[in-house]
Image (cartoon, helix red, strand yellow):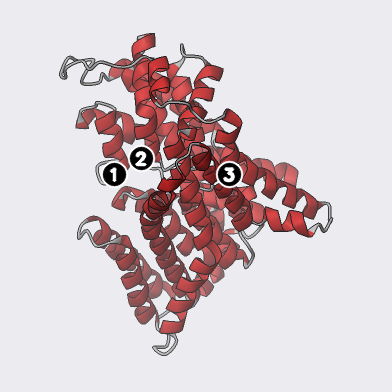
């Protein structure tokens, strides 16, 4: 099969995959693998070649990105359990001021969710949010929306969160045939966060005027809330601020040094070694372990590692399944046909991965699945879309991430975390979390296009 019939078959395959995940409740790994196999059969890949195509797509993903995902997740777990995530939040509150709880929660969420999953981040920081709202008399809903969106933006944009790492690896390895430049993705993610953070802040302020929490409406009994100082003190002695940020900052510095030396055409083996993503993030893990040891809690390290592997395992397998689907697509005639009729896709450019990711996200709920699956589909098409440079590929990761946050609703576990811990009625959850992620997603893709145009005008 080839041409238009093959594209129609592909669209049907994606619809079936979404239905399998969202309606039939079949695990995303099995759904993606099954669709990859079916599409390989329909596309006419020789039967004897299919096992190798599937195996290659699966193993290449594990080989290149598996360790990075595990290490990134382990850093997040250790920062959470040692209180370092809370210390980072404390630094932000002191810098921004307790009288601006919405801004404090927005920035705090954005920083903490770089290594920590947004669901866990909201649970960790929610007591601080409540304490600040009580102290300032400001809207509890506004601070909940600000915290939620701040967490979500970096969760979808910035490594070492597993979704962006996996998407970057797929696009660079499959689309450009080179190692993923995580530093470039981090820089693009940070730049592309500016407009959605601003939009999220004003949205939070606005929604706080229109929506009240159940407690503010008197529907729940008022609970005794600790003051901000009492809350921080209840954790005992928090880690040093520098050490708290170090597991995130040091890997970025190491990758930056390596990139700088490469650009200057200076060969320093030690710098190159330390700047490799796997080694740089491993250094972050070592620093995070030191935090645990310094608190005399090293006996908990095995349990924390076990907990991390349980979290990272499903992400690894879903990512690998996305790699399989991408490899199947690359081995069909679909890519060649699209290249021959590429004018429309070239005109759409970055909007295509954004829309595809948004459709997948809205339909099945998981941002990570949307990121990894979209990356697998888009990777073979990067040259067709005119996005086959390292900078463009990094920006494509962010465009996919923007789609992966658009939108969060009832099929997304994070929606229920925000709704329940934010003390919201379900209908108010839609007004805050669902509409908020739509605002953030649209602002994100606009920010992506601004960066893209800037690069085209000044970067050549």
**Residue 418 visible from this viewpoint:** yes
Residue highlighted by disc 3: 287
Q: In this view, does 431 lie above or below 336?
A: above
Which image quadrant for residue 369?
bottom left
Q: Which of 150 and 42 is in front in this view?
A: 150
Q: Which residue is drawn at 51% across and 14% down?
A: 97
Residue highlighted by disc 2: 119
Q: Is mark 1 on a helix, strand or loop?
A: helix
Q: Residues under labels 2 and 1: Cα distance?
A: 8 Å
**Residue 332 visible from this viewpoint:** no
Q: Residue 413 carries which label?
A: 1
Q: Residue at x 20, y 15 (%)?
A: 222
Spot occupied by residue 277 in the image (x, y as percentages of width and height): 62, 55
Number of marks drawn: 3
Crowd around label 3: few <14 · some 14–19 · many ≥20 (10 Å): many
In this rendering, position of residue 225 left or right of residue 300: left
Q: Is residue 404 above or below residue 212?
A: below
Tags 2 and 1 touching, CB below 8 Å: yes
Q: Residues under labels 3 and 1: Cα distance?
A: 31 Å
Q: Which of 417 and 73 is in front in this view?
A: 73
Residue that lies at the very extreme toward the bottom in this rendered image: 48
Q: Which residue is drawn at 38% across and 32% down?
A: 124
């Amino acid at each position: 099969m080839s041409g238009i019939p093959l594209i129609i078959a592909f669209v049907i395959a994606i619809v079936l995959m979404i239905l399998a995940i969202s309606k039939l409740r079949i695990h995303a790994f099995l759904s993606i693998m099954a669709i990859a196999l079916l599409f390989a059969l329909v596309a006419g890949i020789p039967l004897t070649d299919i096992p190798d195509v599937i195996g290659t797509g699966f193993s290449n993903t594990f080989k290149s990105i598996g360790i990075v995902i595990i290490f990134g997740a382990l850093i997040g777990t250790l920062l959470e359990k040692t209180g370092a995530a809370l210390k980072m939040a404390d630094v932000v509150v002191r810098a921004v001021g307790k009288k601006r709880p919405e801004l404090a929660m927005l920035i705090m969420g954005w920083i903490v969710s770089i290594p920590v999953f947004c669901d866990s981040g909201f649970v960790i920081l929610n007591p601080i949010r409540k304490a600040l709202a009580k102290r300032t008399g400001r809207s509890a809903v506004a601070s909940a929306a600000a915290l939620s969106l701040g967490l979500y933006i970096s969760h979808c944009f910035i490594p070492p969160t597993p979704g962006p790492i996996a998407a970057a690896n797929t696009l660079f390895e499959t689309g450009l045939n080179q190692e993923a430049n995580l530093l470039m993705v981090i820089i693009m993610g940070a730049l592309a966060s500016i407009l959605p953070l601003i939009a999220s802040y004003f949205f939070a302020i606005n929604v706080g005027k229109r929506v009240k929490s159940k407690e503010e409406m008197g529907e729940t009994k008022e609970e005794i809330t600790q003051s901000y100082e009492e809350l921080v003190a209840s954790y005992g002695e928090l880690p040093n601020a520098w050490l708290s940020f170090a597991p995130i900052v040091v890997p970025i510095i190491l990758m930056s040094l390596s990139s700088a030396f490469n650009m200057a055409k200076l060969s320093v083996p030690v710098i190159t070694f330390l700047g490799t993503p796997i080694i740089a993030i491993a250094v972050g893990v070592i620093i995070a372990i030191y935090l645990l040891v310094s608190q005399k809690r090293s006996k908990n390290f095995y349990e924390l590692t076990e907990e991390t592997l349980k979290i990272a395992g499903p992400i690894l397998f879903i990512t690998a399944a996305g790699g399989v689907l991408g490899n199947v697509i690359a081995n069909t005639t679909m890519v060649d046909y699209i290249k021959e009729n590429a004018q429309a896709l070239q005109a759409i450019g970055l909007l295509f991965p954004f829309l595809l990711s948004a459709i997948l996200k809205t339909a099945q709920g998981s941002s990570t699945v949307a990121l990894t699956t979209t990356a697998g589909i888009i990777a073979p098409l990067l040259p067709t879309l005119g996005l086959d440079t390292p900078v463009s590929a990094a920006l494509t990761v962010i465009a996919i991430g923007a789609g992966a946050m658009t939108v969060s609703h009832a099929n997304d576990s994070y929606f229920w975390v925000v709704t329940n811990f934010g003390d919201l009625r379900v209908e108010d959850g839609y007004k805050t979390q669902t509409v908020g992620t739509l605002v953030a997603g649209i602002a994100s893709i606009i920010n992506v296009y601004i960066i893209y145009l800037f690069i085209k005008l000044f970067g050549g």
